[in-house]
C-alpha cells in the first residue's frame, strides 16, 4: 500500500511514529502536520515519487576553543532539522525550493567555482557535487522542497545541515548509500571551505552526518579521527538559550584566544599547543609569566585540560556513567568561564551569558550547563532533568524571551533518507 502524506495518515503510520520518536523525541501530531505541509507544497511544483530526507542541527558539548590548535572536541546532533521532500529528476539539475526563500537551481554539468555565488546555497550545491565527482561518485538531478527549524544565530550550523542534506540525497539516489558518514562530512566541509568561502573546521558537518555525539581529534586536520558515540542518556532535555549580545564587534575577542594560545606554543618551538609537551608547559609557567599575560597562560591551561576532559567524557559515554558525563560538561564550562574567559566581552557590562549561567547554577534539575560555542555573546547550553524541563523553560523564557529558549534532544540519527513506508 502506497504511503499517504496527509496528517491523519502519517500520524497513524507506525514507521512515521518511529521516525518522529527517533528524530524529534515524539510529538507525532506536530511532526505529521509539518511533513504533510511539506509534501503538499512539494506537489505544487513537481510530479513523481516523494522521498523524505533529514539533516539535523548540532551543538558543541565539550572541547571549547580547542580545534584551532589541533585539539579534541565532542559535538552532537540535536532534534531540529532541515527536512526535505525530494523527487529525482532525469535532467542534470538540482533544484531546491526552501519555503519562504527564492528557488535555487544549479546546472550540475557546470561545477566550476562562481565567485558571485560565494556565501549562498548555489555554491554549496555546486561544491558538494564537485566533491562527489572528484571522488569518483555519481551525481544526478533532483527537486527538493525544504523547511528548517534549525535556529539561525544560535550556533547550530544551518549551512552544515544544508551541505549534509545534499550529500545524503546524492548518496542515496545515485550511489546506493555506499558513502560513509565521515566522508560525507568531509565532502560537505569542502563545499563550505572552497565554494561557499567559509574556512570552517569539520566539527559541524561531522556531528550532523554521524548523528549522536561525535568525538573528533584534530591532531591531523587533513585526516581528523572521528568516532560516533551512542548517547544513551534520555532522562534529560537539552536547552540552548540565546542570551543576546551582538557578535559584530567581537572578532578581536575570538582572534585573541587563538593568537594567545599560539604565542605560548611558539615559546616551545611549535605552531600549535597540541604539539607542546604538557609537563614542559607547566614547568615553564614561572618563565612564561615574565613574558606573557596571565590570561594567555590560563588559556593554554584550559586547552590542555580541555583535551583531557574530552577524553574523559568520551569514556563516560562509553561506560554509560551519566553523572560523571554531566560533571565533565559542567567542568568544561567552568574552565571556559575562568580560564578561557569567553563568557563576557571586555567593557560590556550587560554580561548576558554569566547571568544565564548563574541562573542555571541555582536551578533545580539542571544536570550540566556551559557557554555554547564561541562565547562572549550568544548562547548557553544546559542539560535539564525531564521532570524539571517545563519549569526551566518557563523561567528562562521570562528572562530571555520564549523565542530564545530552544528545547532539544540528542539525535542519534545522522543525515539520512527517512523510511516512512512504500513510496507513491
Image: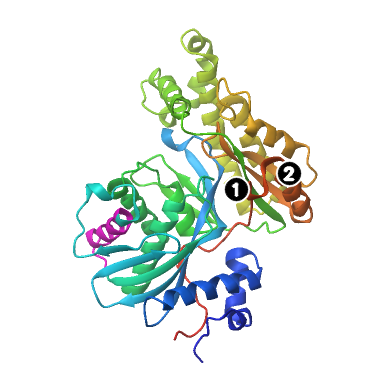
Which residue occupies the extreme bottom position in the image? 1
Q: Residue at x 33, y 44 (%)?
A: 222
Residue at the disc numbered 1 = 315
Q: For residue 131, what is the image quadrant?
A: bottom left
Q: Nearer the viewer, residue 148 or 303?
A: 148
**Number of marks drawn:** 2
Q: CA distance from mark 2 to mark 1?
A: 37 Å
Q: Nearer the viewer, residue 147 or 270?
A: 147
Q: Main secondary structure of the magenta part?
A: helix
Q: Where residue 322 appears, x then y in whole percent? A: 70, 50
Secondary structure beneath dot 1 equals: helix
Could you classify mark 1 by the number of other residues whose Cα lies within 10 Å: few (under 14), some (14-19), or many (20 or more)? some
Which residue occupies the extreme top position in the image? 290
| Scheme of colours in the image | rainbow
Give the mark nearer the N terminus: 2 vs 1: 1
| Residue 170 visible (yes or no) | yes
Q: Image height check: is 239 above or below 180? A: above
Q: Where residue 254 appears, x then y in whole percent? A: 46, 29
- In the figure, is residue 22 to the left or right of 105? right
Q: Residue at x 44, y 29 (%)?
A: 251
Q: Where residue 167 appears, x then y in whole percent? A: 36, 62
Amino acid at each position: 500500500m502506497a504511503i499517504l502524506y496527509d496528517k491523519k495518515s502519517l500520524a497513524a503510520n507506525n514507521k512515521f511514529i518511529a521516525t518522529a520518536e527517533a528524530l524529534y523525541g515524539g510529538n507525532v501530531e506536530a511532526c505529521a502536520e509539518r511533513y504533510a505541509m511539506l509534501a503538499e507544497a512539494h506537489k505544487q511544483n513537481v510530479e513523481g515519487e516523494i522521498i523524505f530526507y533529514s539533516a539535523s542541527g548540532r551543538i558543541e558539548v565539550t572541547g571549547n576553543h580547542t580545534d584551532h590548535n589541533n585539539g579534541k572536541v565532542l559535538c552532537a546532533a540535536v532534534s531540529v532539522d532541515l527536512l526535505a521532500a525530494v523527487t529525482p529528476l532525469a535532467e542534470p539539475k538540482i533544484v531546491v525550493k526552501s519555503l519562504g526563500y527564492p528557488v535555487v537551481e544549479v546546472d550540475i554539468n557546470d561545477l566550476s567555482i562562481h565567485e558571485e555565488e560565494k556565501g549562498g546555497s548555489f555554491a554549496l550545491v555546486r561544491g558538494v557535487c564537485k566533491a562527489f565527482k572528484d571522488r569518483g561518485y555519481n551525481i544526478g538531478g533532483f527537486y527538493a522542497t525544504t523547511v528548517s527549524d534549525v535556529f539561525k544565530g544560535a550556533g547550530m550550523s544551518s549551512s552544515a545541515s544544508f551541505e549534509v542534506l545534499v550529500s545524503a540525497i546524492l548518496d542515496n539516489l545515485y550511489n546506493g548509500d555506499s558513502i560513509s558518514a565521515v566522508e560525507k562530512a568531509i565532502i560537505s566541509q569542502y563545499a563550505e571551505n572552497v565554494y561557499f568561502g567559509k574556512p570552517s573546521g569539520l566539527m559541524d558537518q561531522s556531528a550532523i552526518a554521524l548523528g549522536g555525539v561525535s568525538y573528533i581529534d584534530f591532531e591531523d586536520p587533513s585526516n581528523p579521527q572521528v568516532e560516533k558515540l551512542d548517547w544513551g542518556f534520555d532522562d534529560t532535555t537539552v536547552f540552548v538559550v540565546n542570551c543576546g549580545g551582538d557578535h559584530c564587534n567581537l572578532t578581536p575577542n575570538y582572534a585573541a584566544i587563538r593568537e594567545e594560545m599560539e604565542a605560548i606554543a611558539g615559546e616551545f618551538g611549535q605552531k600549535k599547543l597540541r604539539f607542546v609537551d604538557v609537563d614542559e608547559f607547566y614547568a615553564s609557567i614561572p618563565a612564561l609569566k615574565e613574558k606573557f599575560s596571565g590570561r594567555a597562560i590560563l588559556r593554554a591551561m584550559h586547552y590542555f585540560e580541555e583535551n583531557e576532559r574530552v577524553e574523559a567524557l568520551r569514556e563516560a559515554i562509553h561506560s554509560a556513567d551519566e553523572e560523571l558525563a554531566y560533571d565533565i560538561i559542567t567542568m568544561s564550562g567552568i574552565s571556559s568561564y575562568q580560564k578561557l574567559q569567553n563568557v563576557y566581552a571586555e567593557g560590556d557590562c550587560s554580561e548576558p551569558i554569566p547571568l544565564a549561567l548563574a541562573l542555571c547554577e541555582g536551578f533545580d534539575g539542571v544536570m550540566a550547563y556551559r557557554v555554547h560555542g564561541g562565547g562572549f555573546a550568544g548562547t548557553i547550553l544546559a542539560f535539564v532533568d525531564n521532570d524539571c524541563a517545563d519549569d526551566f523553560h518557563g523561567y528562562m523564557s521570562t528572562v530571555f524571551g520564549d523565542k530564545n529558549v530552544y528545547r532539544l534532544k540528542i539525535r542519534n540519527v545522522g543525515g539520512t533518507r527517512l523510511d516512512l513506508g512504500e513510496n507513491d
